[in-house]
Amino acid sequence: MATTIAPEDYARKIDMLLAKAESTPEPAEAEALIEKAQKLCSKYAIDEAMIAAARNGKAPEKIVREEIIYKGTFAKAYFRIGQAVALANECRVLIRKEYSGDVAMVCIGFESDVARVKQLNAAVQIQAAGSLAVWSKEQRTMPNWKYLDKGEKWRNRRQFLNSFGAGLGEQLERARGQATKEAEASVETGSVALVLRDKKDRVDDWVDQTYGKLRRTHSREYGGSSRAYAAGHAAGMRADATSGSGSVRGGSGKQLGA
């Protein structure tokens, strides 16, 4: 007979893993800890979904919308890092640009999924900022760095963070895929993939009903060197966890004009 683990036990384990990841000076150890936390997040979400599907009509967990604010000159790049976390945890994401220049990530999903996104996001943002600081310090020793103007240095730092988000997304999706396969192998009846698709459809329906159909956009930011891209992407892989002011864009490539 399978042992049932209470939600608070999952939350406690995830919190311990993230605390260790934030405190360790070793990138490889932090990677392993956050990947383990992401697998546990995915496993917990799968378990909740399977239970909800088995309730046959009982009230499901509610869908919620919460905002995370990113500040500073690299706000949009930090948003992309948060977006990677949200998409790996069954959530939809919209972006809202404030008049102040801050960026708000509107995270939409089932209540426990959104809570896990906030938890993981806090950990990986610390790692991203730390990795950027280390990389920037290293660049000051490079012969060509002193010849770059202020704008070029800024674009290279932005490229590092954008690539960090891309690498992080790949890392978290890999952990999510592993957790899904393990869950598929452990359940006796039902399809994990079908249950997760049902969750996604319900969140998508909520977004469509609230915001209407969002048009797809393709917004990419380049301008940094290949060295900045490679370093940022590698750091993200190690990290285990516009149309004007007031616009809103879907994190999966959709936009809503406010």
Image (cartoon, helix red, strand yellow):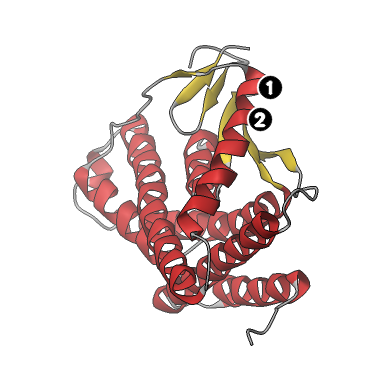
The answer to whether marks 1 and 2 mark residues whose Cβ atoms lie closer than 8 Å is yes
- The residue depicted at 66 percent of the width and 77 percent of the height is 13
Q: Nearer the viewer, residue 189 or 108?
A: 189
Vertical placement of 65 versus 176: above or below? above
SS at mark 2 in the image: helix
**Could you say where residue 97 lies in the image, as x and y percent from the top left?**
60, 23
Asked where in the image residue 105 lies, by quadrant, the reply is top right
Neighbor class of circle 2 (other Cα within 10 Å; few <14, some 14-19, many 20+) is some
The amino acid pointed to by label 2 is Trp
Query: Residue 212 appears in which quarter of the rendering?
Result: top right
Give how far apart the Cα atoms at labels 1 and 2 are: 6 Å
Residue pictured at 76% horizontal, 48% vertical: 57
Tally of numbered discs? 2
Instruction: Give residue 95's position: percent from left, percent from top.
Output: 57, 29
Amino acid at the residue labelled 1 = Thr
Residue drawn at point x = 74 percent, y = 69 percent: 7
Rendered view: 41 above or below 199: below
Image coordinates for residue 160, horizontal then vertical, percent:
36, 47
Element class at badge 1: helix
The answer to whether residue 137 shows anywhere in this view is no
Residue 5 in view here = yes
- Decide which of 107, 205 is in the foreground and name it: 205
Please give the label number shown on residue 210: 1
Q: Which residue is labeled 2 in the image?
A: 206
